[in-house]
Image (cartoon, coloured by chain):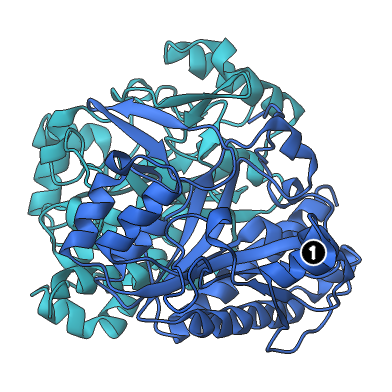
Chain colours: A cyan, B blue
Amino acid sequence: MAYEREAAILKVTSEVLGAAREFLVCEGFVELLPVILAPVTDPLRHNTDRAIIQAYGERWHLTRSMIFHKQAAVRVCDKIFSFSPNIRLEPPERGQTGRHLFEFVQLDLEVRNATRDDVMDLGERLLLHIMEKVRERCRKELEFLGRKLPSFRAPFPRITYTEARHRYGEDFEERLSAEMETPIWIVDFPIEVREFYDREDPTRPGVLLDMDLLYPQGYGEALSGGEREHRQDRILSRIKFQGLDPEAYASLLSLAGEGIPPSAGFGIGIERLVRFLAGLRHVAETRLFPRVPGVPAVL
Amino acid sequence: MAYEREAAILKVTSEVLGAAREFLVCEGFVELLPVILAPVTDPLRHNTDRAIIQAYGERWHLTRSMIFHKQAAVRVCDKIFSFSPNIRLEPPERGQTGRHLFEFVQLDLEVRNATRDDVMDLGERLLLHIMEKVRERCRKELEFLGRKLPSFRAPFPRITYTEARHRYGEDFEERLSAEMETPIWIVDFPIEVREFYDREDPTRPGVLLDMDLLYPQGYGEALSGGEREHRQDRILSRIKFQGLDPEAYASLLSLAGEGIPPSAGFGIGIERLVRFLAGLRHVAETRLFPRVPGVPAVL
């Protein structure tokens, strides 16, 4: 059959979306429609060009993440998620990492009044649920793809950013992901390496209450999240600390003035998850119409 | 409780997404990730400004619909769907119709080798399934919103475009939707009022094998679809007939040269569906961050 490989990967992707949705709905989450155009979006830390259009006399950013919309949404519902298409115009050389698309979908979720530990526990159960359902519903496809999916047990091990840097050096992410037999959490990122919305630990200045999860077998980053800065004064000082213009975040700051609840959450990239589950070389294989930095598209 | 109305509407929206997905997966559909940026997108018939960004030395359209990607995808899987965010920069005056957002989500599906009758039957069962689940799972919310959801039976009545124009005049859509007690299909649009990808009936030149579904109670258009032109020569002549530049559709035409299977499908707007189910005045009420033509957004 032609396209048998593509069909198998699409089936795995579809089951991932279904398994994630069924798990989160059982956990009391409400699914939000994604946001594509917004007056303000995630600044990110690393270099990505800005994707902006003009409409109705205003500038609209293509969403890089729904972080601010999630923080606003938990005023209305205490548990929300969205399958959020993100546009990040990464440098062309990132087209070769196997982990970067300039258009990808992130399962982005947020929980009102949650702690980092709450969402780390949720993330472990979510990942294990998806893996169980994919094993169950995509046996044929995984076999066709030659993928022997490993089994894990929660809780996953944790290591602090500082310890990871100390033990594994600059490229600790690659080395940890390559050496581990199980997913591993990296916690407590220093304030200077992350975005302003990750919450600083009141008891440990300069240390953030955030985390990344790495896949084993060299598949790299799985998810990223943390507790959020929600107080107007804290957000303002963190925006300044990151060297950004508070004017650009005026709407977020005025929203925080009206009151944003404390929350924690994370985003997990669907294409990277499917790449790991299906054992693929490049995330581009997960899409029929991949958007690879620097590579032209046909359709 | 603050935001009780917003929370009720979000709950209905979330159940619509879940009910639609569970129905389609049971029917053997595979969920595709949406496409946001593409070298080519739906030309549409009506005036909408072009939303384009530049990246990696190419021009990327923000997706107005996934029609061409759906036609390409049914080469791989015979039944596909996607919750597809569409950007359509409608004229500002459309902000007042109650039915237009310039960013909305369309449940877009396509079936290989299907006829118009096949997908009309599917559309009726999909809509009735969603209504049944929303009634069941959102009783409290519908009551809070004061919405008494009517009950329908399939098959829904059908009327041809020509007969509808003859009986109800220019604004037949508004009048039919306002007068009906049940959804009604409008079929057989004339070739000059629709896009080039709707298939012309080989036995009735100038008549298309397409359809729209209207909601009753004045809620207007529910879905739009039909059989597709899939032969390269037919697509080319229809592109010319619509007065478009074949060069702009070169990639679609070369794809059709390699072979696109016959298919039929439709798209159903999620915000319009929620507006109907929840009995809302304006689709903007279905979104926490609505994108209303001509209206600035806070976040």
Image quadrant in which the C terminus of chain B is located: top right
Q: Residues within 10 Å of mark 1 (few under 14, many from 20)?
A: many
The three-letter code of the residue at mark 1 reads Ala
| Residue at point 11%, 34% (across, down) | A171
Query: Is B244 situated above or below A275?
Result: above
Image x and y of residue A207, in percent: 39, 28
Task: From the viewer's perspective, tell me whether residue B143 is left or right of residue A218.
Answer: right
B43 vs A58: above or below = below
Chain under numbered label 1: B
Q: Mark 1 points at which residue?
A: B278
- Residue B63 figure quarter: top left
Q: A260 or A133: which is nearer to us?
A: A133
Percent x, y of residue A117: 46, 52
Q: How many labels does the image show?
A: 1
Q: Is mark 1 on a helix, strand or loop?
A: helix
Give percent across and percent down for residue A242.
42, 16
Location of residue B183 (image quadrant): bottom right
Q: Quadrant of residue B217?
A: bottom right
The percent position of residue A45, horizontal first and vertical second, equals 34, 25
| A231 or A62, nearer to the observer | A62
Name the residue: 73% across, 46% down. B284
Name the residue at 88% across, 65% down.
Answer: B144
Would residue A118 be found to the left or right of residue B229 on screen? right
Image height of B99 relative to B245, above or below:
below
Is B165 on the left-hand or right-hand side of B83?
A: right
Of B65 and A92, the residue lying toward us = B65
Q: Is residue A123 left or right of residue A72?
A: left
